[in-house]
Image (cartoon, rainbow, N blue to C red):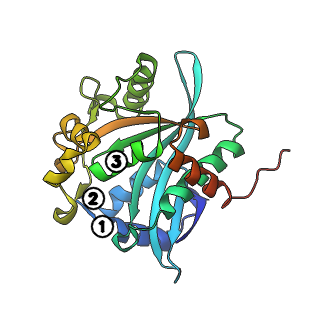
């Protein structure tokens, strides 16, 4: 697949309808109006296209600055992200997404970006250890106090009392729920300690509960595979010309 990152305001109605149609192939209990309301809270969208130019996937992102305990941080919050099941074997989402984040980081002249995401599916959680050396929560390392404070502050700011700081879970008012064929964790996958940890920390994930997760997005914080995806993604976006 091929991709491009665009400002959310440049995504027209026809493309929004296509995005929702793709979203609805895997998720239920979310109306088009709710989908658009969530989209309007973001400021960038990554669009992925098949060779025939049909929409194969997308990821919505909110790239913004926040001050926490006197420290200025740049956050990228991942919104709805869906890739068509017939392209699941394609790693385009990984390198286009990382390339987009690196592009936005350079565009806004930031040294590093903090990735804030909600996870209701084990497949999404499993991407974290594949690509990142520094993510939380995780089974093999406690969350550092300073990172936990950032997670709490960002989650409270975005979700208010829908966020439970004791469990790290966000209970959305109208959560997207995976369709039956994608819901749940196969028993054999629980042998993976990462997936077993996710299942323990988010026991109601099948009902749409979301686990707050966090990572620092910079090349030196990635796994070897993550660095390859980062380098490949950078080649897809134009270099930033200093003014």
Labelled disc at residue 126 = 3
Q: CA distance from mark 2 to mark 1?
A: 8 Å
> Dot 2: what SS?
loop
Labelled disc at residue 30 = 2
* Quarter-of-image position of residue 67: top right
Q: From the viewer's perspective, is residue 22 above or below residue 130?
A: below
- Structural crowding at the residue carrying mark 1, measured as other residues with C-alpha within 10 Å and reported as few (<14), some (14–19) or many (≥20): some
Q: CA distance from mark 3 to mark 2?
A: 24 Å
> Dot 1: what SS?
helix
The answer to whether 139 appears left or right of 92 in the picture is left
Q: Residue at the spot x=20%, y=45% of the render?
A: 191
The total number of labels drawn is 3
Labelled disc at residue 24 = 1
Q: Which numbered disc, 3 or 2, marks the residue that appears first in the sequence?
A: 2
Q: Are marks 2 and 1 in contact (CB under 8 Å)?
A: yes
- Structural crowding at the residue carrying mark 2, measured as other residues with C-alpha within 10 Å and reported as few (<14), some (14–19) or many (≥20): some
Q: Residue at the spot x=16%, y=53% of the render?
A: 188
> Dot 3: what SS?
helix
Q: Where residue 220 sits in the image (x, y, percent)?
A: 59, 36
Q: Are marks 3 and 2 in contact (CB under 8 Å)?
A: no
Q: Nearer the viewer, mark 1 or mark 3?
A: 3
* Quarter-of-image position of residue 209: top left
């Amino acid at each position: 697949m091929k991709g491009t990152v665009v400002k959310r305001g440049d995504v027209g109605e026809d493309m929004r309808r296509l995005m929702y149609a793709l979203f609805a192939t895997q998720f239920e209990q979310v109306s088009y109006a709710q989908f658009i309301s969530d989209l309007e809270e973001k400021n960038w969208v990554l669009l992925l296209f098949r060779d025939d130019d049909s929409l194969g996937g997308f990821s919505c992102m909110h790239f913004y600055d926040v001050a926490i305990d006197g420290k200025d941080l740049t956050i990228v919050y991942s919104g709805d992200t869906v890739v068509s099941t017939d392209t699941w074997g394609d790693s385009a989402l990984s390198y286009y997404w990382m390339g987009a984040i690196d592009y936005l980081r350079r565009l806004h002249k930031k040294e590093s970006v903090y990735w804030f995401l909600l996870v209701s599916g084990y497949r999404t959680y499993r991407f974290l250890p594949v690509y990142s050396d520094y993510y939380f929560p995780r089974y093999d390392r406690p969350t550092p106090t300073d990172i936990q404070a950032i997670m709490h502050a960002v989650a409270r700011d975005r979700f208010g009392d829908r966020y439970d700081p004791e469990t790290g879970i966000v209970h959305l008012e109208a959560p997207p729920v995976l369709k039956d064929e994608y819901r749940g964790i196969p028993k054999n996958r629980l042998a993976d300690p990462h997936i077993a940890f996710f299942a323990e920390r988010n026991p109601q994930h099948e009902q749409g509960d979301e686990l707050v997760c966090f990572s620092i997005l910079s090349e030196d914080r990635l796994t070897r595979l993550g660095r390859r995806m980062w380098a490949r993604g950078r080649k897809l976006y134009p270099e930033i010309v200093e003014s």
